[in-house]
Image (spheres, rainbow, N blue to C red):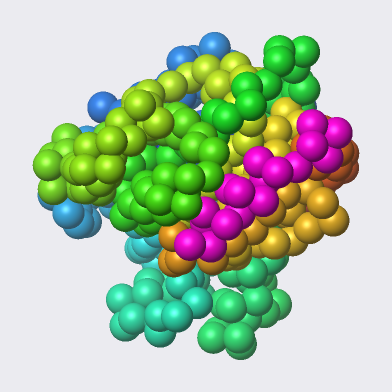
Amino acid sequence: MRLLFVIDSLGSGGAQRQMTTLATGLKARGHRVEFFIYHPQYDHFRSELDQAEIPVHAIEKQRRFEISIPLALRTQIQSQSYDAVLAYLRTPNVYASLAKLLGSRTPLIVSERSADLADRPVTWRVWARRQLHRIADHVVVNSHHQRQRMERDLPWIKPKISTIVNGIDLDTFAPSSTQKADNILLAVGRVSAEKNPVALAQALVQLKEANAPLPTIRWAGRIPDKASNSPFATINAILEAHELTDHWEWLGVRKDVPSLLATASALIHPSLREGFPNVICEAMATETPVLASNIGDHAWLLSENRGLVFDPKSPTAIADTLQTFFTLSQTEKASMGANARSFAAQQLSTDQLVSSYETLFAEVRSPHGR
C-alpha cells in the first residue's frame, strides 16, 4: 500500500515517536510511506525517516491557522494514488479532514493521542473539532479510556472508532544488566503544568518534613523558552526554599532514555493528562518499576503488580506512594519489573502496532490506490 502520514512536525513528542515507529515498521514490510508536515524546523525524528528512505513533504506554517495547509495537503493527496491518509494530533486531524472536505477522495484515518480530563466538560471547541471526525473514514485512539469516553459523548462514532495502543521496540527497550540505583527516580516529559512536576516537588518536601528517605528526581524533557513563567521556575523556588536542590536534576531533552531507565530505581510519571504514554511502556519493557498517576489507562497497564498508581492532584498521595515503593525489597521490585516486561512483550510490541494499522489500512484502502 501507498500511505501518507500527516502530523505537525518531527519534533521530540510521543505522537511523533509513534508515527515514526509505525512508518518505519510499515516500510520494512514493503509498504510505501510518505509524510506531510508543516513545522519542518522541529526535526528530532527526521534522521530516522531519512535512514529508512521515507519521503517528507513539508510546508512552513506562519500563522495559527492557515487555509493554505489543507489546500496544499489536498493537492499532495490528489497528485498521488495513496491508498489511505493517516493524521495524528488535533490540528493535523483538522487539516486532513478539511483537505478531504475540499475534494480528496482518499480514505482518511484520524487519531486522537490524548485523553479528556475526567473532571472537565467537553468544550465547544473540542465538540466542533470532533464533528469533523464525521468526515473521516475511521478514528483511532491510543487508550481504551478515551475510546469509552468518546463513545459515550458521541454515540454516532461507535461504528468507526477503535483503540490501537502504542508500540515499543522491545530490542531497544530491553532489560539491562546495569545495576539500578537505590534512590533515583526518572521522570520523562516536557516541563509543563500538564506533566505535574510541581506536585512531585511538593511531595519531595513532604518526605523531607516527615524525615523519610529522600530520592533524587532526574527530569528529562524540554524546558520551555520562557522558563521564568513556567513550572520550571516554581519548582526551583520550592527546592531552594526547602534545601532540596541536591535532590532534583534537570536533564533537558535526551535521546538516551534506555540508558537512563537502566540505572533508575523507578519511573515516576505524575502527569495530569495522558493518552497512552510512551515512556510508561518503555519503562515496563526495560523491567523498570513504574509509579504513575491514576488516570487514563494507567491502572490497567500497572495492575497485577506491574507498578503503583496515585492521585496526581495530591502531593501527599504521591509522597505516600514513594514511601511505599522504597520500603519494597529488591526481590519485590524485581518481580514488579519482570511482570511489566512480560506484559509489554505480549501487548505493547512494535509488531502488534504495525499489524493493527496494516489491517485497518487494508479495510479502508482506496480502490484507486496502487
Above or below: residue 16 compared with residue 25:
below
- Asked whether 263 or 42 is in front, the reply is 263
Left or right: 221 with respect to 113?
left
Q: Where is residue 126 shown, x and y percent of the image? A: 37, 75
- Asked whether 252 or 213 is in front, the reply is 213
Q: Is residue 254 visible?
A: yes
Q: Which residues are magenta?
A: 316-332
Left or right: 72 with respect to 108?
left
Left or right: 205 with respect to 113?
left
Q: Where is residue 171 shown, x and y percent of the image? A: 76, 20
Quadrant in the picture for the N terminus = top right
How many numbered marks appear? 0
Q: Is residue 37 visible?
A: no
The quarter holding residue 104 reads bottom left
Q: Where is residue 283 shown, x and y percent of the image? A: 66, 35
Q: Is residue 28 magenta?
A: no
The quarter holding residue 226 reads top left
- Asked whether 307 or 61 is in front, the reply is 307
Above or below: residue 66 compared with residue 46:
below
Q: Where is residue 90 shown, x and y percent of the image? A: 40, 59
* SS majority, magenta: helix
Please tell me which residue is depicted at 83% across the width and 40% down the height of the picture: 332
Please tell me which residue is depicted at 35% across the width and 26% down the height of the picture: 246
Please tell me which residue is depicted at 38% across the width and 32% down the height of the picture: 248
Please tell me which residue is depicted at 52% across the width and 17% down the height of the picture: 256
Quadrant in the picture for the C terminus = top right
Q: Is residue 323 magenta?
A: yes
Above or below: residue 325 compared with residue 184:
below
